[in-house]
Amino acid sequence: MFSTYLYTKDYPDPELLIRTSGEYRISNFLLWQISYSELYFTDTYWPELSVEEFNSIIESYCKRDRRFGGLKEERHDEN
């Protein structure tokens, strides 16, 4: 219900947030919308972000195990 009051209500929540410039904070950017987003931090400043690095970030994202807030189930073998 809360989402219906946001300016971004007509847009899907981001799946990936790329934070450039070496900062390891999100600065209150889209806090509600990025609750299940994957975060990627890079030391590169935005104007210098190359196509190669961007493709590397996307490749890294594709390898992630997305759980959307859930915990990964662990197998416990009984011996």
Image: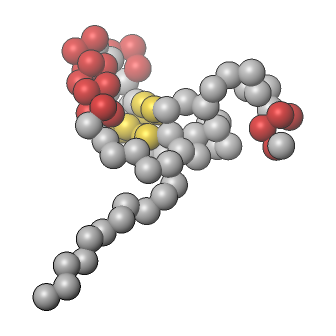
* Residue situated in front as seen by the camera: 55 or 10: 10
Which image quadrant for residue 56? top left
x then y, percent, for residue 63: 26, 37
Tell me what residue is drawn at x 36 percent, y 65 percent: 73
x then y, percent, for residue 30: 64, 36
State how many labels appear.
0
Residue positioned most to the left: 79
User: Is 35 located above or below residue 18 in the figure?
Assistant: below
* Residue situated in front as seen by the camera: 55 or 79: 79
Tell me what residue is drawn at x 76 percent, y 27 percent: 9
Quarter of the picture holding the C terminus: bottom left
Quarter of the picture holding the N terminus: top right
Which image quadrant for residue 57? top left
Residue positioned most to the front: 78
Tell me what residue is drawn at x 83 percent, y 34 percent: 4
Tell me what residue is drawn at x 28 percent, y 11 percent: 51
**Residue 23 appearing in the image:** no
Q: Is residue 52 left or right of residue 5?
A: left
**Residue 64 appearing in the image:** yes
x then y, percent, for residue 66: 40, 45
User: Which scheme is used to colour this image of the protein?
Assistant: secondary structure
User: Is 28 located above or below residue 44 in the figure?
Assistant: below
* Residue situated in front as seen by the camera: 66 or 76: 76
Which image quadrant for residue 34? top right
* Residue situated in front as seen by the camera: 11 or 54: 11
Q: Is residue 79 left or right of residue 41?
A: left
